[in-house]
Amino acid sequence: MKEILVKDILELCNGEIIYGSKNNEIKEVKKDTREINNGDTYIGFKGEHNDGNLMYLDALKNGAQICILEKSSVENRIKLDEIKNNFPNSTIICVEKSIEAIQEIARYKRNLYNIPVIGITGSVGKTSTKDIIASVMSRKYNVLKTLGNYNNQIGLPLTVLRLKDEEAMIIEMGMNMLGEISNLTKIAKPTVAVITNVGTAHIGNLGSRENILKAKLEILEGLEENGILIINNDNDMLHKWNEETKHEGYKVITYGIENKSDIMPYNIVLSENGSTYKIDIDGKTYNVNVSVGGNHFVLNSLCAIATGRLFKINMVDILEGIANFELTKRRMQVEKNKNGVTIINDCYNANYDSMKAALEYLGKTNTNRKIAVLGDMLELGEFSKELHEKVGEEVKKNRIDILITVGNLAENIANKAMEEGMNKDSIFMRRNNREAVELINKLAKKGDAVLLKASNSLNFQEIFNEIIN
């Protein structure tokens, strides 16, 4: 493990030591006092409703040895006597901006390691692609991967700072605006970059899919010289960009089902419990088993094959990694409740592209009735009505039996599905999660499948928790 000491932080961040030793080591860095273990470093962030900088005593009580705090929040408010009396071995550092500090520390730590780093971005499928690539890479390397949704301006640096003795890192990069991935990729410095697709997520902030493409391509700014970019060649925006762009300083590897690509499957058989296909590699034919259903997971597995081959992982190990990978919770999490109803929990987030993929999956399940519970999609700006209506078209197209919407925006889904010819008696609009739970419990019977999908702020996990038991 590469050491970072308090004195390094002071130099990197122009920080000031308020109490303690410059020679203490920065270990696990946490932003939540409840997650602190003995010896950890706590960093405080000022949130919309709470100021984490003011919770340093809670962090020290839970075992933190070092606290990094924002000067403007704690200036003249540090209780030095209490620290000296109760936590004499601790160290308190003040910095100008916590976000800038953690990014500088992460950038410094990344530079201490000469290991494969795979950076993943895209409108849809970042987390599931990360999970399947990590499973494949783990066949050869001790892997560190992004946990949960730690893919933003704070989460990515915290992920990098978890590096210890790992031999490879798989890291997600999310964004809401132009310039954000540019910053993240310069911290992570990927040796391999992956773009899963360019869709409509955050189109309200970015204004067009062309700008979304531009934002995703920022990942190249941190890619090492002569690095590799892996792209989904079936995505219209990426396919067009690849065809029209002269690639200098990096190599592009493509994967796809529809468009001719470097990594392509054939004889695809889709089912609700998984998929199988054949692929020809180096003159040999291999049978691939994907443990999660849906066409998009076939694409994810192709990306994992492309990645594994780059690192000379043999095909047997690659196939085992694909067959045995586990998804992060709330992303196509499929479980049955005590009443025999299949619950498809895909409620972490939602945009048109992920809604479309989830409805296609639901439509192909071998269940009695297909029930879609869909909520508002946010951050779509002027495109909101149009994209919600396009989801309504997908509801009808995939022959969903019952549609339940939650939220004002999602009413556009219901209205469009009705306009497309779906039976109005099978469409229900509800105001909140409680009303949706009551209706699901009334309607869903043994052998049915229920899909839960909405933007994260609608907290559809609440619905899942109520109907899974």
Image (tube, rainbow, N blue to C red):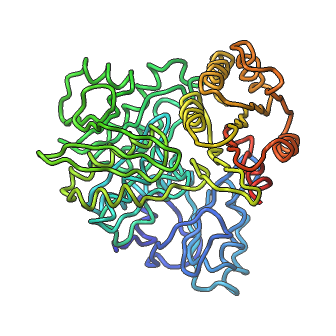
Q: Based on the displayed image, in which of its 4 quarters is residue 281 positioned?
A: top left
Task: Please state which of residues 370 and 177 is positioned toward the viewer in this rendering.
Answer: 370
Task: Please state which of residues 227 and 130 is positioned toward the viewer in this rendering.
Answer: 130
Residue at the image position 70 percent from the left and 38 percent from the top: 369
- Return the x and y of residue 215 as percentages of the image width and height: 43, 29
Q: Is residue 76 above or below residue 255?
A: below
Q: Please, which residue is most extreme toward the left here?
A: 283
- Return the x and y of residue 405 as percentages of the image width and height: 77, 31
Residue at the image position 73 percent from the left and 37 percent from the top: 373
Residue at the image position 72 percent from the left and 66 percent from the top: 55
Task: Please state which of residues 236 and 361 is positioned toward the viewer in this rendering.
Answer: 361
Q: Please, which residue is most extreme toward the top here?
A: 419
Question: Is residue 180 visible to the viewer in this orientation of the structure?
Answer: yes
Q: Is residue 282 left or right of residue 11?
A: left
Q: Is residue 122 left or right of residue 154?
A: left
Question: Is residue 96 visible to the viewer in this orientation of the structure?
Answer: no
Residue at the image position 56 percent from the left and 24 percent from the top: 203
Quarter of the figure that contains the N terminus? bottom left
Q: Is residue 304 above or below residue 353?
A: below
Q: Based on the displayed image, in which of its 4 quarters is residue 116 positioned?
A: bottom left
- Return the x and y of residue 434 as percentages of the image width and height: 87, 45
Quarter of the figure that contains the C terminus? bottom right
